[in-house]
Amino acid sequence: MSCRCVACCCVVLVLSCAETSAVGCEEDAVELLQDSHHEKGFLFLEAYPNQYVAQRLHTGQSVQIDGNLNETVWEEVPFTDSAFKDIAQPRFPSYVLPSQYATQVKVRWDAEYLYVGAFIGEPWVETGFVRGSNPSLTSSNPIYNSNVPYYDNDFEVFVDVAGSNHWYKEFEMNFNNATYDVLWRVPDGGLGSTGVPCCAITDSSCKRYCQNSSWPPFGGTWSMVPHMKTATARADTAHGWATKGWTVEMAFPLRPKDGIGGLLSAGHGASLGEKFDPSHGAKYWLVDFSRAEHPFFTSNSSLFGQLCPSIQASQPTLLGSDQWSCYWEWVWQPVGGHRYMHNPDTFGFLQFAQERGEALCGNVEWPARYVLAQIYQAEIAYVQTWGNYTENLWTLLRGYCTLDNGCSAQSLSKVGSIYSHIFNLKIQVDASATTCVRYAVNGSGTNYTGGPCFVASVEIVWPKWTRLHSQVKGSIREEPKKRRNGRQDRRLNRHWSFRVSVFSPFFFRRQLGEGSGHLNFLAEFRGEMEHGRVEAHRWSTGWVEYA
């Protein structure tokens, strides 16, 4: 018999098994209870995202940020074990990324920083045009606004610490160690992926709402520089790598300090709070890693329209032909049918482990998160056709839930039929509202306000055979949310709210017996659960509450 487990933030929920070691799960939780005899399909594990266990640095350890990954702190932890895929691969499933472009990532953390190390396979190491960092990026390429690393071949990190689609961070760097970082208040749109309609990058008179970055065209102030530390190095077979390429190291500050940003930054210089801090018991963040690869480099933008389509004819996963040139985007966690990274609800999970390490354990929120993400994508497709939302799940399945918008009609149809007793799903629409995002309908204008609102919520009713004594409730909304002072944020978009309640750890003692090796493990987590208790949530974040 094998045993898997699921985890709720910082509480491990063991289903049943006496053989598993006290350190955690014995096998990958992506295959949690994958047994057709027990009808586990409602967990939607075939869509469960990639997950990496980040081990905390041992006491006295430190990371020397020099671009090399030959230190003990890196050698004692594994690389990601899932091959990077082309972001457009769901549309072209037979496409396989050539092995010479293999990419692998490692992650560590301590009380102050999140450390990321990566190997980027590259037949040639292109030095690129861009140098510097926010706000002083420069480029020898004269193309307008080309002074950002994604004009070169780059490596990228996306982090949504709250799992709410709000205040997520984008980071990019090239081999020159040029860095670019952005605080996104709401998801950006592009390449057919719907985001919040906000200022055009060329509109200097528009007040920035969607993003904050000290990169001058964004007109903001936010950056993790100079507290952020980064470096790159060449990698080749002579130094033990399987193929030629380059390596990167980065240390992202966890908290904003002295006016400098951190991964826990929110808007207006605020912080997202201790409940999302791994040092205070946070268990999961949403993260993704990617790289942009260009088929050619030029200082003449007029060539994009000539060269890109000719390459796309034989390489259909090649993206774009506009001012950013064309490029491939290769990702750790595919983002559904989307071809744009700015879809945080599709990111993978980063699981925080203490110094002793622990096995990979799946996030108990997953089934609810997955279902709500599908609902949201279908609703946005619907409102762009009819100018309003619908409360009818089956209406959404009439052509509004497709691969193109990262929505699985097959999954949603099961939620409304064979799994309807498990997912207590409600969709509420306020058609008369004018406080939510107004999307384009039949050529009409868009705005971050002026449109109708909806809330989709779900509560999971676990089948009795699972023996899970957890309560999972979640919602995703296109509606304004009141701040603590009673005012509304009229432009709140795609906002997650989650509540996970876990009963007393004594449940596990009764279930497993006094002699079980799980008891010490669960008792350790009990202390974290109490330490992580929260009584309220910020208006700007998703939330988790322990009971």
Image (cartoon, rainbow, N blue to C red):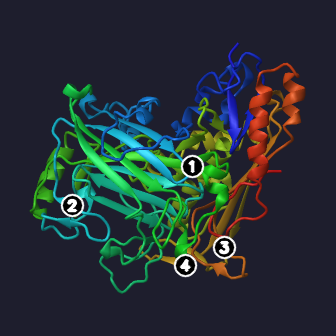
- The image quadrant of residue 538 is bottom right
Whether residue 454 sits left or right of residue 161 in the image: it is: right
Foreground disc of the pair 1, 3: 1
Mark 1, residue position: 285
* Dot 1 crowding, Cα within 10 Å, few <14, some 14–19, many 20+: many
Numbered circle sitting on residue 131: 2
Residue 338 at x, y percent in the picture: 43, 50
Q: Is residue 142 left or right of residue 161?
A: left
Distance from the alpha carbon under mark 1 to that under mark 3: 34 Å
Q: Which residue is mark 3?
A: 431
Q: Decide which of tag 2 and tag 4 comes sooner along the chain.
A: 2
Separation of disc 3 and disc 4 at Cα? Answer: 14 Å
Q: Viewer-proximal residue, 522 or 243? A: 522
Distance (Cα) linking label 2 and label 4: 37 Å
Give the spatial CA distance, label 3 vs label 2. Answer: 49 Å
Asked which secondary structure carries label 2, the reply is strand
Q: Which of marks 1 and 4 precedes in the sequence?
A: 1
Report crowding for label 4: few under 14, some 14 to 19, many 20 or more residues within 10 A (C-alpha).
many
Q: Nearer the viewer, mark 4 or mark 1?
A: 1
